[in-house]
Image (cartoon, grey):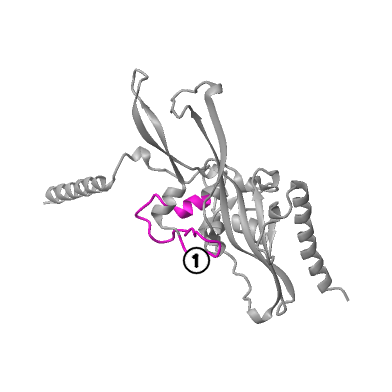
Amino acid sequence: MKKFTLLSMVLLAACFAFAQDDEVEGSTLDQPVRKPVETVWEQVNVGDFAEPIAFPPVRQADVMYYWTIWRTIDLREKINHPLYFPTETRGTWRSLGQTIFDAIDIFNPERTDGVLPIYSDEMCTTPYSREELQGIVTQTSTIDDIDEEGEVIGTKELIQQFEPKEIISYRIKEVWYFDKQYSTFRVQILEIEPIIEYERQTANNSYYDEEPDEEAVEATKTKKRLGYIYYSELRPFLAKQEVFNVKNNAARLSFDDLITWKRDFSSLIYKESNVYDRDIAEYIANSRDQRIESEKITDKLRTFENDLWEF
């Protein structure tokens, strides 16, 4: 009787083990065995506990003054490099562009909730559909179809997807306002617009696997707008993504900390509220004078805040 009971237990254990093996899909070698190894201690990611800090409530009756400003953040400036790098994801470290692309996640049809919407207008009222976004982040070109002998036998379409590292600047719209309830002069970002700058090489309208003759190559840089992102909808994704701290790696910051609260970035004002609704470049042609005009707008805001406390 004891032998029969022991044999039954062994058979049940074997059946349970085989049943578990059937549930595993794919090779076990493809499955991650641990979190990314980045430090000698157990790493607690920012995304495990971070939530965006809420702004103080604002009533229209308390706003005594406000001014709308449009800025350009150029990622080629050294101070803005924490927003651009890394160009490829490394463990839990991602760039701002990669964070936005992951939040959009347009090529995953199974994901229906938690997707960041992209809007077609600056007021963020009309969002793009998934199909429209797929057309924005990809480029379709017609190339020659070449057989093994090098003869052109027709044409075919080449679909190229833009990469986060091709986002070289951002345009942000922000509101500066004085709140009499708190007696403070504050700023909040309303929307952000990624700008893609890409370079596509063509050689006599043909596609080559090998590098063609340099004299036959034509390459032009083109800028393309990704769309408008409502900043309040983007903040939950920024708060969960850690950014590289150039001063101390142990003092972890999120993109929300860096952009929203610390405002540790360099930018250039290209537009302010005006009756003509025009950019600075529309009435000042020289780039040097445009920068001077941008500094004048900054000084105007700074002077307004200083005059509030002058007795």
- Residue 246's place in the image compared with 210, above or below, is below
Q: From the image, give the main secondary structure of the stretch colored magenta.
A: loop
**Percent x, y of residue 278:** 66, 59
Q: Nearer the viewer, residue 18 or 171?
A: 171
- Horizontal and vertical percent position of residue 104: 46, 54
Q: Nearer the viewer, residue 193 or 114?
A: 193
Task: State which quadrant residue 63 falls in.
Answer: bottom right
Please give the residue where the numbered disc 1 appears in the rendered image.
125
Report if residue 16 lies within the magenta region.
no
Note whether 96 is above or below 117 in the view shown.
above
- Element carrying mark 1: loop
- State which region is magenta: 99-127
Does 113 sit left or right of 258 as displayed? left
Quadrant hosting residue 298: bottom right
Quadrant where the C terminus lies?
A: bottom right
Q: Circle 1: is it few (<14), some (14-19), or many (20+) Cα within 10 Å? A: few
User: Which amino acid type is shown beneath numbered disc 1?
Assistant: Thr
- Asked whether residue 32 is in view, the answer is yes
Image-based side of 47 in relation to 5, left or right: right
Q: Where is residue 155 in the image (x, y as percent from the top left)?
A: 36, 31
Near-viewer residue (222 or 251): 222
- Residue 121 covered by magenta stretch: yes
Residue 273: percent from the left, percent from the top? 68, 65
